Image (tube, rainbow, N blue to C red):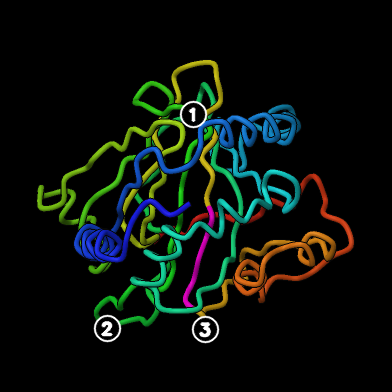
Amino acid sequence: MARYDDSARDALAAAFERDGFVMLPGHFPRATMDAWRSAFEPLLEPHLHATDGNRGPGRYYVTLPFEGEFADPSIFCDDDVLGIVERVAGPDPVMCQLATDTPVRGSGFQDWHRDTPPLFEGIPETPSFQLAVNFPLVDVDEENGSLETTRDTHRVSREEALAGLQDGRFAPERVPMRLGDAMIRDVRGLHRGTPNYIGTPRPMVVIGYSRAWYFRPEVRIDVPRRVFAALPARAQRLLRYNPQVDTTPRTFDESYRQFAY
C-alpha cells in the first residue's frame, strides 16, 4: 500500500538529489521485518563459526537466497521505493543485489568509502546510476553499529569528499534506524560502518537498484524459476538481468567487497 502521493515522492526525490539519501520512517511492517530476521538468523550462523568476518573483523556480508520471505514483492517492488528510485535513477530500473551487512561484537569502524567508482574517470560526477535501499532487521543505534554517512558527497569526487570531511565542509552523521525504517541512498555518498558493542548481531538488508542500462558484474541474484513464474509482471521486469536457476543455494561465495572509492 503506497504511503506517498506524487507530490510527496517528488519532494523526497528532491531531498535525495540534495543530500544523497532519504529516509522513509516506519515504512515496512515490523511483523514482516521480524519474519525476515527469523529467516536470516540460520543463514548468518555458519559465517560466525567459519571466519572472523568477510568484511573485516566481526563484520559479515551475507547474500540472501531469493525465496520465501526474501522474495516478497511487497518489499522489493514497493510502490513508494520504486517511485523514488525511478525519479532519481530513471525509468525501468534493474534490481541487482539482495544481501545483508551484519556487524557483531568485536567489529570496528570501517574506512570511509564509496561503494562504486565514478561512472567516467576524470569528469564531474554524473546523475545517480546506482542506488541502495537499506533497512535493518533490528532497531539500530550507536551501541549496535549505526551507519555513519555524509550529505552532499554523492556528486563530488572521492578525493574532494575526503578532503571536505577532513576540513569540516562535510560533517559525519550517524543514522539511527528503527525496525521498519528504510533508507534510499546513492552508493557514491561517503560513508562507513561503525562498531557493534553489544552481543546481538545487527543485520542491515541492502537491495540494489541500477539504471536500466547499468550492469554490475560483481553482484547478482540467483532467481529460482518457480519463484520468478509466480511474481507479478513489474517484479519480473526488475529482475530481468539476473540468472534463473532451478534451486537457490543456502550459502554463497561472498567474495564481493565494497570498492575503496
Q: Can you tell which mark lies on residue 213?
A: 3
Q: Earlier in the sequence, mark 3 or mark 2?
A: 2
State yes or no: residue 252 in magenta: no
Label 1 with label 3: CB-CB less than 8 Å: no
Position of 81 compared to 191: left or right? Answer: right
Q: Is residue 20 above or below residue 233?
A: above
* Label 1 SS: loop
How far apart are the alpha carbons under marks 1 and 2?
36 Å
Residue identifier under label 2: 123
Q: Of residues 1 and 61, which is closer to you in this image?
A: 1
* Label 2 SS: loop
Amino acid residing under circle 3 = Trp
- Magenta stretch prevailing secondary structure: strand
Residue identifier under label 1: 107
Q: Of residues 2 and 11, which is closer to you in this image?
A: 2
Region in magenta? 207-211
